[in-house]
Image (spheres, grey):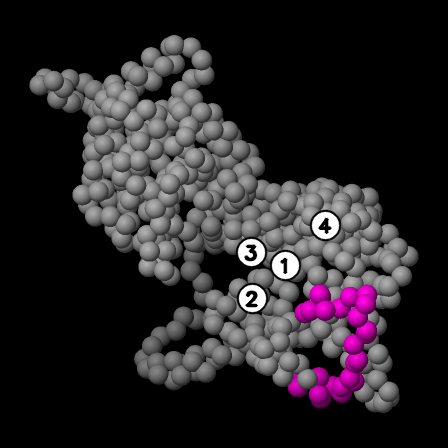
Amino acid sequence: MAQVLEFKLPDLGEGLTEAEIVRWLVQVGDVVAVDQPVVEVETAKAMVEVPCPYGGVVTARFGEEGTELPVGAPLITVAVGAPASGDVLGPADPSARDGRDGREGRGGRGGSAGSGSAEGSGNVLVGYGTSEAPARRRRVRPVQPTPPTAPPATHAPSRAAAAAPHALTDAAPAPAVVPVGPAEAGAARAPHTASGGPVPVISPLVRRLARENGLDLRQLTGSGPEGLILRADVENALRASATPAASEAAQSVPDTVVTPAPGAAPDGRRIPLKGVRGAVADKLSRSRREIPDATCWVDADATELMRARAAMNAAGGPKISLLALLARICTAALARFPELNSSVDTAAREIVQFDHVHLGFAAQTERGLVVPVVRDAQARDAEGLTAEFARLTEAGRAGRLTPGELTGGTFTLNNYGVFGVDGSTPIVNHPEAAMLGVGRIVPKPWVHEGELAVRQVVQLSLTFDHRVCDGGTAGGFLRHVADCVEQPAVLLRTL
């Protein structure tokens, strides 16, 4: 008899809590292999193809294209081969489903149960996948209580199995089941969680919601199957706790306060702040809240830099981009002023200086602003930087950037001159400590060698975290960058 397994949206890493279904890659009735991509989802960082750790026949899909699902929500169900002889529960039994959840953890960790393979799924996405299939657990059918008036207690054994999967093996005896009545069910669950036992929560979104609002999940009684705490339970508890405060505030409002008429709403169109736009908003807001930033800027004569680039490209070989030359200048300046290639650990009250330069660069795409990261930029020459910038930019425009290519930067280069503007005050890309902004390079009157001439002038601006350094260090860094722009030969000292 085939066993139906439920595959849930896995944890895609980097704190992502939801994803939008872009395109289904399978239909109901299709046969899928282990690790075959079944759906393409878009997170706040990238588009990802999600592979399924089970092999079998797709029996159901959850969510239409364009639907946003939280991490831990069901994606598809797959009918796999006949279960082993120790599996005595059918797929429709909720305790069987909860037992599986206990093994898989967040987002469906675990191998392809029921496949009989010891090799594991081999999934590579963060948050689920195994290199070796876990040992099969025996599932236990709940014992029906003897008194005819008491309903069967289905939650006790399955929650125990889900909470402590390693304690229930083929060699372990079946746990005893104590029947409880409906009046005792809630009381039976409450002491279990209050005494330090596991909290019956599967969804990481529920845990995050409770954590951000300071709510103790051990004080809640879940309304889901087997006492599972759902998001609705947390939201109801938060509304209940907010009601007294709201009542007191309402009583303290003077009678003269005029409230808007029911149903009145401001004019305009409402646009959901989600996806890339929502991620950018969250990151920039956090930067403004946590980082005491300051900005300094300087005009520089980029005529010699433009001539040097033209000479490089005329010599043959791959073309060198201006962004690559600016990146090379940045890495040389960071070697001289390492304070700006750092991050602040607020919990430890320490400044962490990095030995490597993972250089982020701002790129505008149809999906919004993204900041891909060039790993170990200090070890790349101008040609290597040009190739990596081109690869990441193309991947960003196609929506193929992975979360790993969008995180981990230590310094950001922002060439906003491509938008035709001269200057800006960039916002530091949290948790980095600095960002260099580059305006457009345009002909301007400039005093050169004592005479007025038309030169290619660019404005450079540096926004930095004032906790990691003072103005002298920031000014020294920016002056060194300007000197390299005006006289590229200065870079020869660091080659």
* Lateral position of residue 310 relative to residue 384, left or right: left
Secondary structure at badge 1 equals: loop
Instruction: Answer above or below: position of 162 versus 385.
Output: below
Q: Do the residues labelled 4 and 2 touch (CB within 8 Å)?
A: no
The amino acid type, in three-letter code, at marker 3 is Thr
Q: Work out whether mark 1 precedes mark 2 in sequence or the reverse, and give the earlier one.
A: 1
Q: Can residue 105 be seen in this view?
A: yes
Dividing the image into 4 quarters, which one contains the C terminus? top left
Count of marks placed on residues: 4
The amino acid type, in three-letter code, at marker 2 is Arg
Numbered disc in front, either 4 or 1: 4
What residue is pinned by disc 3? 17
Q: Residue 8, how many percent across, how many down?
A: 68, 55
What residue is pinned by disc 1? 106
Q: Work out whether mark 4 precedes mark 2 in sequence or the reverse, and give the earlier one.
A: 4
Q: Residue 222, how many percent across, how many down?
A: 64, 75
Q: Are marks 4 and 1 in contact (CB under 8 Å)?
A: no
* Lateral position of residue 273 relative to residue 149, left or right: left
Q: Are marks 2 and 3 in contact (CB under 8 Å)?
A: no
Dot 1 alpha-carbon crowd within 10 angstroms: few under 14, some 14 to 19, many 20 or more: many
Residue range of the region highlighted in magenta in the rendering = 163-187
